[in-house]
Amino acid sequence: MADRLVPIISLKDFVNRKEEITKQLVKAAETAGFLTLVDHGITVDEIEKQFAISKSFFDLPAESKGKTPHDSKSNNGWEYKAQLRPSTGTYDQKESLWLQRGSQWPSEEDVPGFRDATKEFMDKCAIISNQVLSCLAIALNFPENYFLTANDPSEPDCLTQLRLIHYPASENTPEGTWRAGSHTDIGILTLLFQREGEDGLEICPGRESHSSFAMGDVFTPLPAHTGPIVVNIGDMLMAWSDDRLKSNFHRVRAKDAGKTPSRYSIAYFNQGRRGFVLQGPQKKYPPMTVGEYFIQSVQRNFARQQAIAA
Ligand SMILES: O=C(O)CCC(=O)C(=O)O
Ligand SMILES: [Fe+2]
């Protein structure tokens, strides 16, 4: 079921196969809004190494993690079970560390090697994101480099973030506990890395961010594997494409009531440059800067964090 909804797309020989890859990406982006990338250039070893680095941060005592506290203005830093979802009315059962290239990072003493390895990982995510976004730009009749400029992570106003996520194990999970409540991503394009066997991600094709919250809809589980990258369209790109590309709801559920094993995931959120003006080729929505759009999306999705990106 998931394979049919979420196509597996290979980026092998990208330059020579760009036309074919573009067709596959656009079809997926126009339907489920989700796809899985393989042959993308990041090895299983590199992904496992980044998960090990992430674990070494989350294994620290709260006082150490709290040295980079979550800041609601920038949305960077470490939060613990602090994300209240309007879709569930409860806090997500997870902790996460949001990082931007220029934000405050954990110290070398607390997590040796963290910064260099993680920055390298972000650079690799940026290369893959640029490949996908150059294909989508062509399909939307924008110049090929349009999103690369709009989302250049080396620019200081770029809102792109890496989020390391840890869903702690629980001996006694009450039934109906949400590890991450149903939501859409507010940015342009998300790359999500999962670890073999740490399932829980579910997607809801057909229910998009510009309609109401996904209550009572049919969700499809997407099994977790180390290697393939789950990619989804965010709200900003949906607006930017005049709703042609779909930003769909997804969530993370606890495996069973009772004993639930831990889950780690890593998300790279391409979120554009604050000052860039966003408008689709058909001009379905009035022009808006990425910064303004970001605030509006945050208000819709995360009522508690209205100050983010203000
Ligand atoms: O942990 C996951 O697999 C999903 C995370 C997610 O959807 C998000 O942080 O937006
Ligand atoms: Fe998400």
Image (spheres, helix red, strand yellow):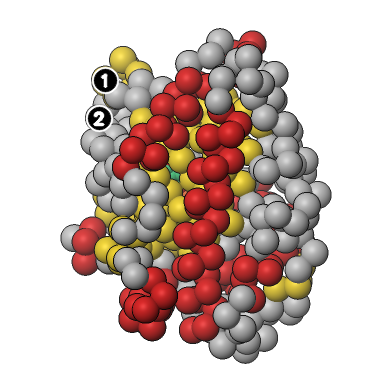
Asked whether residue 131 is in view, the answer is yes
Q: Which residue is mark 1?
A: 259
Residue at 70% across, 19% down? 67
- Quarter location, residue 188: bottom right
Quadrant of the rendered image containing residue 49: top left
What residue is at 28 percent from the left and 50 percent from the top?
222
Q: Is residue 188 above or below residue 116?
A: below
Q: Is residue 24 above or below residue 82?
A: below
Which amino acid type corresponds to the residue marked 1 in the rendered image? Lys
The reply to whether dot 2 and dot 1 touch (C-beta < 8 Å) is yes
Q: At which x and y percent is residue 233?
A: 48, 64
Q: Looking at the image, which residue is at 44% across and 24% down?
A: 55
Q: Amino acid at mark 2?
A: Asp
- The secondary structure type at the circle numbered 2 is loop
CA distance for labels 2 and 1: 7 Å
- Across and down, in percent, residue 32 comes to 36, 67
What residue do we see at 68% from left, 43% from top? 101
Element type where label 1 sits in the image: strand
The residue labelled by disc 2 is 256
